[in-house]
Image: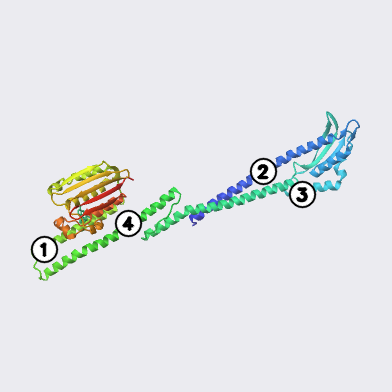
Amino acid sequence: MRSLRAQLSLTIMLVALVMVALISLLSNLFINRRFEKYVMEQQEKKTSYIVDNISLQYNELTRTWNHDTVYTIGMYALHDGYIIKVRDRESDVVWDAENHDMEQCRQLMEEISWRMDQAGNTGAFVSAEYPLQQGSRTIGTVAIKYYGPFFLTESDFSFLNALNVILLLIGVFSLLISFVIGWVLARRIAHPITKTVEIATQISVGNYALRFEGQTKTKELDHLTSAINNLSEALEKQKQLRKQLTADVAHELRTPIASLGSHLEIMIEGIWAPTPERLQSCYEETMRLGKMAADLARLEESESDNLVLEKTPVCLMELARTVCGNFAGELANKDLTLTIAGDESPLNLDKDKISGVIANLISNAVKYTPKGGHVKVSVRDTERESILIVEDNGTGIPEEEQPFIFERLYRADKSRNRDTGGTGASGGAGIGLAIAKSAVSAHGGTVTVQSRLNSGSRFIVTLPKE
Ligand code: ADP
């Protein structure tokens, strides 16, 4: 099987070859035809010139011929390939080239015949007789013998040869140029395809690091290369997520399971009495682990879901209002007030995912704000982006922990957290913000935090309007 590049190069070269051959052949044919016509016209002109000129050499008054000029005309004609014989009114020969120089005439005829035979012509010497006239009077005849239907002189041949050489050179030159262009073009088309195949092969063996660099300048090829790039990027991200998740889960589970194990062991060995409080604490730990497992499943689902967004035109302000409405009960329970203000901000987004993000931020604000506190939601609309801000005057987050709160399974100040979350079973596993961040990133946006311990926190979600 031939490679695409070889096949393309060969096809382009073949087309070029056929085109150049065709053009050379046709132009050669047409030029030759045209030239033959031209030569025939010249021949006609020349014979009529000879006839007219000889006619002038007869003096009617003296009834004599100007033999010297007739001789000159005859010799010039002979030199041009015309053998003439002039007769007077009485059919007596006035001048005959063959009589004058038999040898030269024979040589000339041989030479012309040979040249024309060489060029593939199958003509022969023909003789035509023309009347010589002065006014309406006939003063004699001239017989002109020449190679018919036409013949080419030596300079005609050298002109045609030079033309053929030029045509050949143009042919060779254009062939070379088309070979080079064909080769470059084939390379330009074949290279991205070969590279894409290479990337796809690597993907099939689990290596997602390869990417197609640069642009192809061809729309379809660009689509192909960006599709393969997106595919390997998505797979790489998935692989990374899986790896990270396994590491996080192992890390997060190891400590509580070890402590649970050691507590139970101590009780089994009878060192500790299995009091209801101790058993309750162990029970809470198992519930927390169970919740964590459920959250992890949710996270995995959301992260793979985020690769596909179902965007629709939505007003961010309206969406925030709807989500806030769902928190009426919780707010009342904790005696919190919530205000919502700002601009109407239309943009395209995945409604469910962004609702989830807003719900998570408000739920955190509610969770980490003590009784009587305040939660403020605002929306800002700019030309390029929509901004959603969720503020509270709750516990705040220590500065050193702020960079990590969007990471999976991260909980700031774990002891404080458990207090806030109440029982272990309902306490956060540090997954909500990770899900929120991944949903916002999938939209090409960012989520950041500004917070001061014991003063409150402000979460800022920025979503681009494409
Ligand atoms: P969780 O389920 O633990 O709330 P999140 O991912 O939603 O997990 O939050 C991660 C951590 O960030 C929380 O454990 C908490 O310590 C901190 N946090 C998030 N929102 C707030 C807030 N509004 N006020 C104070 N701390 C917060």
* Residue under the image location 36 percent in, 54 percent down: 231
Q: Give the quadrant of residue 421.
A: bottom left
The percent coordinates of residue 375 (x first, y second) are 18, 48
Alpha-carbon distance for marks 4 and 2?
Answer: 68 Å
Report the residue marked by disc 2: 31
Q: Which residue is mark 1?
A: 279
Question: Does the residue tagged 3 have its C-beta within 8 Å of any atom of ligand 1?
Answer: no
Q: How is the image coloured?
A: rainbow
**Left or right of residue 65: residue 281:** left
Residue at 38% over, 54% down: 229
Q: CA distance from mark 3 to mark 1?
A: 125 Å
* For discs 4 and 2, the disc positioned in front in the rendered view: 4
The label shown at residue 114 is: 3
Q: Nearer the viewer, mark 3 or mark 1?
A: 1
- Which amino acid, by three-letter code, is at mark 3? Trp
Amino acid type assigned to the residue bearing label 4 in the image: Lys
Q: Between label 2 and label 3, give the one nearer the viewer.
A: 2
Q: Which residue is mark 4?
A: 237
Q: Circle 1 — which element?
A: helix
| Residue at 10% across, 69% down | 272
Q: From the image, which quarter does the C terminus lie in? A: top left
Q: Residues within 10 Å of mark 2 (few under 14, many from 20)?
A: some
Front residue of 339 and 57: 339
Going from the N terminus, do you reach mark 4 or mark 2 first? 2
Q: Amino acid at mark 2?
A: Ile
x, y percentage for residue 8?
51, 52
**Label 3: which secondary element:** helix
Report crowding for label 3: few under 14, some 14 to 19, many 20 or more residues within 10 A (C-alpha).
few
Amino acid type for the residue under numbered disc 1 = Leu
Eyeballing the image, is 279 above or below 176?
Answer: below
